[in-house]
Image (spheres, coloured by chain):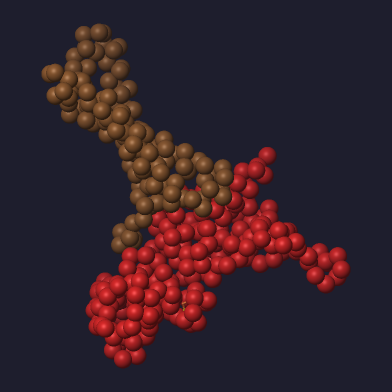
Chain colours: A red, B brown
Amino acid sequence: MDVQLRILRFDPERDDLAHWEEYAVPAEPSDRVLDLLHHVKWYQDGTLTFRRSCAHGVCGSDAMLINGRNRLACEYLVKDAGRAISVEPVPGSQVIKDLLVDLEGFWDKYRSVMPYLVNDEVPEDGKERRQSPDERERFDDTSKCILCGACTTACPSFWANPDYVGPAAIVNAHRFIFDSRDHATEERLEIMADADGVWRCRTIFNCVEACPRGINITRAIMEVTRQIEIRRP
Amino acid sequence: MFRYRISWSQLAWLGHRLSGIGVLVYLFMHIVENATLAFGPSVYDTTQTFFRNLPVRLGEIVLMAALVYHSLNGLRVVAMDFWPATTRWYRPMTYAVIVGTIVAMIPLGLIMITPYAPWNGR
Ligand code: SF4
Ligand code: FES
């Protein structure tokens, strides 16, 4: 069967505005939207530009707005997407070319939450920092993030205020805030308590609906918010 | 961003905002309306006659629905704030708020419309 694929295209060297282009692409129901994009790029128009790397839902590089929702092109199947599929760059982001958006701001926010283990003490036995299964479980959900950005770019609060640190960065702050081995909880909570931090969450759940890893992002945001409130003198 | 396909939970938030603004606007109107009492009973009574008719009553029913919705949805948001684990049920909770508003509005709407209803022998 053929799928009608609409792609919102933009070439900064030729276009002032983005425009739709349609492609008829042969596809099986078990194909992924990424396969359709490959087909266009390889056989119809080599200038089509998009990110992808692993093609198996691991690297998080191909989040796009597909049929009106943020999803990974490599995980969304034709049998679920239907015979008419529209593909656009993720919303609220500066488009560089076609489906490629500028993620610098996204990474800046990610870096701002210190997404690494901070602990200068030598472990008791000199080798390992031990953790009970319960302590590990505490941040299990947020450790699954692949940093695709589908959540942040689906968030109306982020659309309204691009300075909002965003769900993805909060998820990654949560992952370390609730890690019993980490020592930088206070600093991270301080960053999260900023005016552009967790308070901007309006519990709209677009992030949760978009997350390809099924992370309960709003729960993570609320847990960080609770920590800030509990620790306030 | 207007291309994003709206979900029930996003709609719930939008409804919360709109009902909040609606109730706020009514509140100001209400203050002005009551303040006419300062000009004496006759001025107050005349203003009140503007508010005693079917279109206004229909508006009041919408206002009541906005209030009920805003309160129920507010409780949902507060619950998720205090007990983050409840976010797991955000979808059923959202549906419950919508259904709850409709169910509450059936008797409330009936009571409110009765003075203007044909079955009231008018
Ligand atoms: S939380 Fe989910 S949607 Fe957000 S960046 Fe991580 S994997 Fe992607
Ligand atoms: S290409 Fe790696 S997640 Fe889709």
- Which picture quadrant has residue A80? bottom left
Whether residue A48 is visible: no
Residue drawn at x 26%, y 11% as measured from the top left: B39
- A201 to the left or right of A42: right
Residue A38 place in picture, x, y as percent: 37, 85
Residue A56 place in picture, x, y as percent: 49, 79
Closest to the observer, A231 or A18: A231
Quick one: quadrant of the C terminus of chain A?
top right
Q: Residue furthest front?
A: B119
Residue B72 place in picture, x, y as percent: 42, 37
Closest to the observer, A223 or B87: B87
Residue drawn at x 27%, y 15% as measured from the top left: B36
- A3 to the left or right of A170: left
Closest to the observer, A132 or B77: A132
Residue drawn at x 43%, y 51% as measured from the top left: B91
Q: Residue furthest right?
A: A125
Residue A83 place in picture, x, y as percent: 27, 75
Residue drawn at x 50%, y 64% as measured from the top left: A214
B106 shown above or below A163 = above
- Which picture quadrant has residue B17? top left
